[in-house]
Image: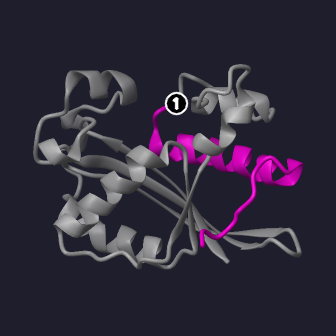
């Protein structure tokens, strides 16, 4: 089965208010759960010119300014590439899927890209509640700590870095039996 770890950075929190994706990263793997094999199949990382301002709160989190994006392609040029990747997958692995998955789906549909309806989404945040003493949704650093994955807060909120450490944590969680990919019925 083909899985992709995916993360985005955005201009703000609400796509319904016109916020846009400004960075996307996907790491692809060919996974055989029976044989417990994982083969890296490639990656895609792209910064995107949102053609709009970036909220100050969002910029404080990810550190990406509009000046950093002026020479980058616009979403209409990136969407076909990321759409092809997403549609080639059986599963998307996302930390905070309730944010990234709808944001990505909205942005793809906004420019006429369709998403196959049978893609499964696994959220490492929602499925990682065991990683915190109180059972709250863990942030990525907490999840990595619980799974003994090195996590550098100074590198956090770069889409590629976040996907890399999330996938390390995901695979460790699979190996320990803390995560399982199960199709929804």
Q: Position of residue 60 (x, y in %)?
A: 33, 21
Which residue is identified by label 1?
A: 156
Left or right, residue 174 beside residue 10: right
Q: Is residue 156 left or right of residue 117?
A: right
Residue found at x 59% / y 33% = 140
Residue 88 seen anywhere in this rendered image of the structure: yes
- Residue 132: give x, y in percent of width and height: 70, 25
Q: In which quadrant of the rendered image does the N terminus lie? A: bottom right
Judged left or right of residue 66, residue 176 is right
Toward the left, the furthest residue is 52
| Residue 90 in the image, given as x and y percentages of width and height | 58, 75
In terms of image quadrants, where is residue 145? Answer: top right
Q: Which residues are magenta?
A: 156-185
- Residue 167 image offset from top left, x and y in percent: 66, 50
Q: Would you say the magenta stretch is mainly helix, strand or loop? A: helix
Give me the residue at 76% from left, 53% from top: 171
Please report the residue visible at 23 percent of the width from the left and 40 percent of the height from the top: 14
In this rendering, position of residue 56 left or right of residue 140: left
The reply to whether the magenta stretch includes residue 160 is yes
Residue 119 versus residue 67 in the image, above or below: below
């Amino acid at each position: 089965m083909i899985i992709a770890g995916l993360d985005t950075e955005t201009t703000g929190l609400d796509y319904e208010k016109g916020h846009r994706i400004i960075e996307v990263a996907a790491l692809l793997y060919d996974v055989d759960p029976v044989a417990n094999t994982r083969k890296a199949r490639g990656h895609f990382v792209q910064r995107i010119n949102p053609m709009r301002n970036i909220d100050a709160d969002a910029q404080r989190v990810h550190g990406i300014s509009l000046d950093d994006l002026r020479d980058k392609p616009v979403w209409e040029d990136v969407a076909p590439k990321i759409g092809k990747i997403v549609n080639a997958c059986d599963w998307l692995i996302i930390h905070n899927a309730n944010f990234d998955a709808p944001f990505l789906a909205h942005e793809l549909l906004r420019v006429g890209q369709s998403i196959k309806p049978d893609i499964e989404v696994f959220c490492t945040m929602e499925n990682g509640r065991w990683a915190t003493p109180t059972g709250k949704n863990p942030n990525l650093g907490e999840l990595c700590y619980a799974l003994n994955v090195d996590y550098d807060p100074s590198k956090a909120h770069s889409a590629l870095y976040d996907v890399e450490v999330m996938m390390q944590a995901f695979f460790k969680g699979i190996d320990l039996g803390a995560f399982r990919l199960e199709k929804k019925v």
